[in-house]
Amino acid sequence: MELKRILARDARSANEKAVAQYGPDVMVISTSQVNGLTELIVAVDLAPLTPEEAEPFLKTDFARPHSLKPTPKFDVLLGQTLDHNKRTSRERQATQVAKSIVEVSANPTHTPAVKTKTVAHKASKPVADETDSVKAQEHDSLRGKEIVALVREELASLRREFKLGQQMAAWQGGMPLPAALNPLRDALNDAPIPVALRALLIDSIKDHDNLADAMGALQRQLSHAVAQTPAPAPMTGMHVLAGPSGAGKSLMVARLAQSAAVQHGCEQVMVISYQDQRAGAWNQTQLLSAQSGVDCFRASSAATLKLLLEEHADRQLVIIDTPGVQMNERLADIRALRADVQCHAVVPVDASAATLRRVFENTDNRWASLMLSKLDEACQPWALLQFLTEKTLGVSVASRGDRTADLVQDVSMGDLVQRALDNLPLAPSDEASPSLRDAAVNSLAASKLSQIAARFQPETTGMTHE
């Protein structure tokens, strides 16, 4: 079969011309416009060759029997081609080296030292880029492994909660509660509260017969359980902030630096980013430090960090920001350099129980205080409340909002408890009486009034004491 080309002024003329030349069984392959004419590509059957016409082809190597041997495999041919290219490249390099030696011998005053130095200078940037790429890949690999480990811990925590919930269901089902407290019990069961804390809360409301008294009992019980001695805000000395990825450590560092810059002056405050290989992390640190006017440095190794600490030992406040990946290893490196460093754990208010357990499971870390981030975004801080009932660790500062000036230094655990109770899914059922709905509304109003009164109580007490 052979392809033929036909040109005509339009498609109809081209088809008529093809039928006239090659018969009605002609096969049209394609149609297109070329320089205002219609181009038609058709396929035409070829007539068989006569013995005289085929004789030249029969005498070629393609018609001999040895040409019918099987073709080597692709991998064999590829290997032969690569070996040939390597030999050719080595021969070409050897020829160039020999030519250079001959040129230098012919002209001894000419030395290629400057050229070699230039080549080395040009090659330094790709090597640095390759090193940064390798570090970024290692960071991503470690971050992926920690995410997988965190997911496994979350699943294990859910299994433990489920088993404990099954064991507590029989006990809670047999506990008689007044009908007015059924909405509150349902709300506690629907909220993401750890099973042990939920059992404690339900046990504390069993002796009350109305919703307002039960809500007050919950608030008093939780406020007493999470009461902690507040820790001072880090405004002098050397402090390290650590925590899980995404907890808001960099923003917390910027807020502390800005608050200290107002107190001591921006020239007395320094921020160090230690081994943070996240994409854009260093640019974020520079931008946040520029807002408060403090100096920021980047330490990619323990030796660099030691040099920076020795060079700026006269600063009033040094804040070291650490990555969320390999948190325990980074803290061990810093403690090996300076024994007087104070470590602070930064966790979001709505952190899960597995995240809190992962941060505080290492007993080698001595935490000076707990810093709470994302205070305005938290609506269910139940895991943190249970942690505070089990551990004795003072809260130094908290943060809310997106601005660096939004730093809360006087953190009230009562406000955190009230936030958790306000976000309970408390809704009276359809079968409930109107008086029950009124009791729910009145209890919420009473809790709001008590919250407002608690805010004014410290100021009044302070004035009376003076």
Image (cartoon, rainbow, N blue to C red):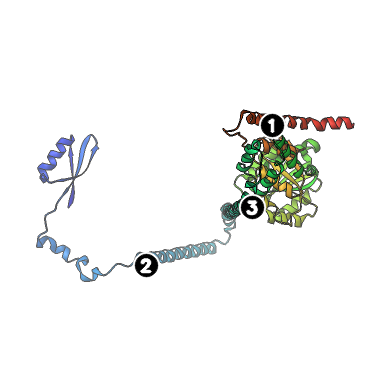
Residue occupying the point 76% across, 53% down = 366
Estimate the spatial distance between the alpha carbons at disc 1 and disc 2, rounded to whole Å: 83 Å
Residue position marked by numbered label 1 in the rendering: 443
Residue position marked by numbered label 2 in the rendering: 76
Q: Mark 3: which secondary structure?
A: loop
Residue 298 in picture, x, y percent from top left: 68, 48
Quadrant of res 351: top right
Quadrant of res 424: top right
386 sits to left or right of 338: left
Q: Nearer the viewer, mark 1 or mark 2?
A: 1
Estimate the spatial distance between the alpha carbons at disc 2 and disc 3, rounded to whole Å: 46 Å
CB atoms of marks 1 and 3 within 8 Å = no
Q: Which mark is residue 325?
A: 3
Between 187 and 155, the residue placed more toward the observer is 187
Q: Nearer the viewer, mark 2 or mark 3?
A: 3
Residue 282 in picture, x, y percent from top left: 64, 45
At label 1, which amino acid type do we have?
Answer: Ser
Farthest-out residue, bottom: 66
Quick one: label 2 or label 3, which is nearer the N terminus? 2
Between 141 and 407, the residue placed more toward the observer is 407
Quadrant into which the C terminus falls: top right
Quick one: label 1 or label 3, which is nearer the N terminus? 3
In this rendering, does residue 310 appear at all? yes
Residue occupying the point 72% across, 52% down = 305
